[in-house]
């Protein structure tokens, strides 16, 4: 299988630290054993194998571009403009931008949540950036990413310059607050309500943060990882097939 | 459908009034009198409303109303015939597809996503598969033939989607001829889908790494025939509707939304192009080799429903052009799945005595001659393939606008999170901006010009 092996150099104590800037990417899980199945005994002798899984970590300059991976490219241009524009406003870029990740030809800025609104407004209004179109917010729940469990991911498209970037903001489960982007991108109205409905992310400053899909009196937030699927077993030709969340899974 | 009079005193309706309104007699609630109307008795309701001194009525149109494109609930505050406030109620078709994907393998995901926006199944599959391929890093390995067939299917799908948009939009205006024509022509496209994939809807034909299987024998000729028929038939919409003064009277200036409104509300697709901005991901951010096809991006500068109708007609002609270019490229045979045996689905489909299933040749091989192939098949089909951790965003230009898939993997055989940015969902937010201040009857036209599909809105 095309499995990726964790860098053995990765210090594992990292996950014990409070949510701070890390050398690698976010650790989102730990895998044990050889074959990924959890429900049967592993007789291969590799049952004690432990690997951490982390998302791609911060990139170093030059960032390159979507097509050219090497050397100075469009991504450097965007990062320079953004950092310059934030600097002009008296905001130290390193305080607002937690880290910059370049992975699979995509540029991601991890933004500190308290500066999200300012960064988004800069990205929209600065003539050299001009990201006019926000394609909404997609929330992701990483229960293993301690202190940064909930991530909100925004994809911004610049029609003027024909570019696409991603903003990522995180919040801990204990304090699931992220500033609303509705004042900057009104399109996020329903998107943020959807993310609130399914993940319990509270977007401060949203004009009417209510449930969108689920009934108003619904308990819980269904797309969080700690919310069970609630599948039911299926009987087919006399045999019981367990519910999808009860079937054998591989990690 | 129910209407209510806000601010009306409880117990206001007298016995005489109750007689006048007959079986639709109002019910007193804390929010005012609530009438439940099931059709045919509007006169009585109007009469009862006229007697009250308050002209302001809140109408819940839908979620079961025939002209709201499925289970969309429009909450309209009406002052006489004028809509003073319009809001949408959605979620009636929420099926938890995004959550369900997290409990299936990456390949099984296509079976779910094809059911989201059920009028554009191939776009859902393509966006999802492009995202998975980006995560796997195999975009360059997808065979050309697979990409060309994807484009072919997507463009045929654009035709069928636009035909439904025009057909149902016409029907909601009372133009039933357009409806009959639209569904007649959609049938031509669905027959081609059935020929190629075996199904008219919910195909799950585009898979991560390529396609479920190659085109069947004779498909190219049939598609060519279909294109000929469609080319002839599309002119009929022009004759029937484009110059029709009644049609223009209902459509022109209705559902107005300008470029600034579109940008701030995130509107894409024909609605955005009706403001004159030729934004089309097939041109600006090409995928599946769209940069190598010759086609135009039609625009209008009217910002209204009529412009969107014209754009849809023009886009259908452009799609036919692309389909013809695809047919020319498909003459040469080739692979339709990546060569990496750790990702490619091992079996091909074949028609057996009990319907479509795994090809008998493949079963004969794995059961009779190769234990290793059997294990390989079993592992790949039950366990699936692993996708390296990370996230990717892939967007395609669906007939309704930008359809984006945000795909996250944690390195296992199942998606960690898949989020779809469905254009219908985003575009439906424009209802308030388009409808407020207009007439009730124009709400229908404006909503039809957005062309929302609730399967995609609610997912």
Image (cartoon, coloured by chain):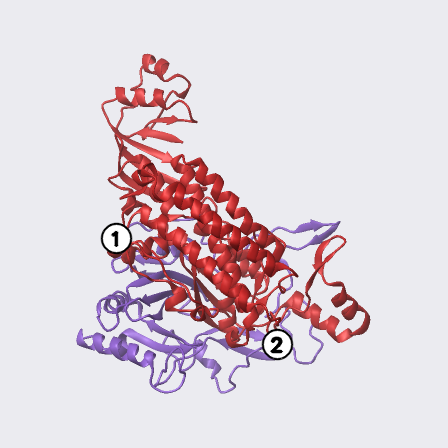
- For residue A29, say whether it is visible: no
Residue found farthest to the right: B368
Same chain check for tags 1 and 2? yes
Res B258 label: 1
Res. B176 image quadrant: top left
Res. A74 image quadrant: bottom left
Residue at x-position 30% and y-position 49% = A208
Asked if residue A49 lies left or right of residue B69, the reply is right
Tag 2's secondary structure? loop
Q: Nearer the viewer, residue A48 or B84?
A: B84
Residue at x-position 31% and y-position 20% = B48
How many marks do you count on the picture?
A: 2
Marks 1 and 2 sit apart, C-alpha to C-alpha, by 48 Å
Percent x, y of residue B267: 33, 55
Is residue A93 positioned above or below B206 on the image? Answer: below
Q: Nearer the viewer, residue A52 or B47?
A: B47
Residue labelled with disc 2: B340
Chain coloured purple in the rendered structure: A
Q: Nearer the viewer, residue B8 or B217?
A: B217
Is residue A36 positioned above or below B51 on the image? Answer: below
Res. A77 image quadrant: bottom left
The subunit carrying tag 1 is: B
The subunit carrying tag 2 is: B
Quarter in which the N terminus of chain B is drawn? top left
C-beta proximity under 8 Å, tags 1 and 2: no
Is residue B358 positioned above or below B228 on the image? Answer: below
- Select label 1 or label 2 by which is in front: 1
Residue at x-position 44% and y-position 43% = B167
Residue at x-position 28% and y-position 36% = B439
Percent x, y of residue B183: 50, 43
């Amino acid at each position: 299988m095309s499995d990726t092996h964790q860098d053995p150099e990765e210090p594992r104590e990292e996950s014990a630290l409070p949510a701070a800037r890390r050398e690698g990417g976010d650790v989102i899980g730990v895998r044990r054993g050889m074959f990924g199945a959890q429900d049967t005994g592993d007789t291969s002798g590799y049952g004690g194998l432990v690997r951490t899984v982390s998302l791609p970590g911060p990139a170093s300059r030059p960032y390159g571009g979507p097509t050219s991976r090497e050397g100075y490219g469009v991504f450097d241009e965007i990062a320079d403009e953004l950092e310059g524009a934030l600097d002009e406003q008296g905001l130290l870029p390193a305080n607002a931008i937690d880290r910059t990740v370049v992975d699979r030809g995509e540029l991601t800025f991890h933004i500190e949540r308290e500066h999200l609104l300012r960064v988004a407004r800069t990205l929209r209004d600065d003539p050299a950036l001009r990201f006019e179109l926000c394609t909404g917010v997609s929330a992701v729940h990483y229960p293993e990413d301690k202190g940064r469990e909930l991530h909100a991911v925004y994809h911004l498209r610049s029609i003027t310059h024909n570019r696409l970037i991603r903003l990522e903001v995180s919040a801990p489960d204990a304090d699931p607050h992220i500033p609303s982007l509705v004042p900057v991108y009104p399109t996020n109205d329903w998107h943020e309500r959807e993310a609130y409905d399914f993940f319990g992310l509270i977007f401060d400053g949203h004009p009417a943060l209510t449930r969108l899909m689920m009934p108003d009196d619904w308990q819980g937030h269904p797309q969080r990882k700690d919310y069970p699927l609630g599948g039911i077993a299926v009987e087919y030709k006399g045999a019981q097939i367990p519910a999808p969340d009860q079937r054998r899974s591989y990690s | 459908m129910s209407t209510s009079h806000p601010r009306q005193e409880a117990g206001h309706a007298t016995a005489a009034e109750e007689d006048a309104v007959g079986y639709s007699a109002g019910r007193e609630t804390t929010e005012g009198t609530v009438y439940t109307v099931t059709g045919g008795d509007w006169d009585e309701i109007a009469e009862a409303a006229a007697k009250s001194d308050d002209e302001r009525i809140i109408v819940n149109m839908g979620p079961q109303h025939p002209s709201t494109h499925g289970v969309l609930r429009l909450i309209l505050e009406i002052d006489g015939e004028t809509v003073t406030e319009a809001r949408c109620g959605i979620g009636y078709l929420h099926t938890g597809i995004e959550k369900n994907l997290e409990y299936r393998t990456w390949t099984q995901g296509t079976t779910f996503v094809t059911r989201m926006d059920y009028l554009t199944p191939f776009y859902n599959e393509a966006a999802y598969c492009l995202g998975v391929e980006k995560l796997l890093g195999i975009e360059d390995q997808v065979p050309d033939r697979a990409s060309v067939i994807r484009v072919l299917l997507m463009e045929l799908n654009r035709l069928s989607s636009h035909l439904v948009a025009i057909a149902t939009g016409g029907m909601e205006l009372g133009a039933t001829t357009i409806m009959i024509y639209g569904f007649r022509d959609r049938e031509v496209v669905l027959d081609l889908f059935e020929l190629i994939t075996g199904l008219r809807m919910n195909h799950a034909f585009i898979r991560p790494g390529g396609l479920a299987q190659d085109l069947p024998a004779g498909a190219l000729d049939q598609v060519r025939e279909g294109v000929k028929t469609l080319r002839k038939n599309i002119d009929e919409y022009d004759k029937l509707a484009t110059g029709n003064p009644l049609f223009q009277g209902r459509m022109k200036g209705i559902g107005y939304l300008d470029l600034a409104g579109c940008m701030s509300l995130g509107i894409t697709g024909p609605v955005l192009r009706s403001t004159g901005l030729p934004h089309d991901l097939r041109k600006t951010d090409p995928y599946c080799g769209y940069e190598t096809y010759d086609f135009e991006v039609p625009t209008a500068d009217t910002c209204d429903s009529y412009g969107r109708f014209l754009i849809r007609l023009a886009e259908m002609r452009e799609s036919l052009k692309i389909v013809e270019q695809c047919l020319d490229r498909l003459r040469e045979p080739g692979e339709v799945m990546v060569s990496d045996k750790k990702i490619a689905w091992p079996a091909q489909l074949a028609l057996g005595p009990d319907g479509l299933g795994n090809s008998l040749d493949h079963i004969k091989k794995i059961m009779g001659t190769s234990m290793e192939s059997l294990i390989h098949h079993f592992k790949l089909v039950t366990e699936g393939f692993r996708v390296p951790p990370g996230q990717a965003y892939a967007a395609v230009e669906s007939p309704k606008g930008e359809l984006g898939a945000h795909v996250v993997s944690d390195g296992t055989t199942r998606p960690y999170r898949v989020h779809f940015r469905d254009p219908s969902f985003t575009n439906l937010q424009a209802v308030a901006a388009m409808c407020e201040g207009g007439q009730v009857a124009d709400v229908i036209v404006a909503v039809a010009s957005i062309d929302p599909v609730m399967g995609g809105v609610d997912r």
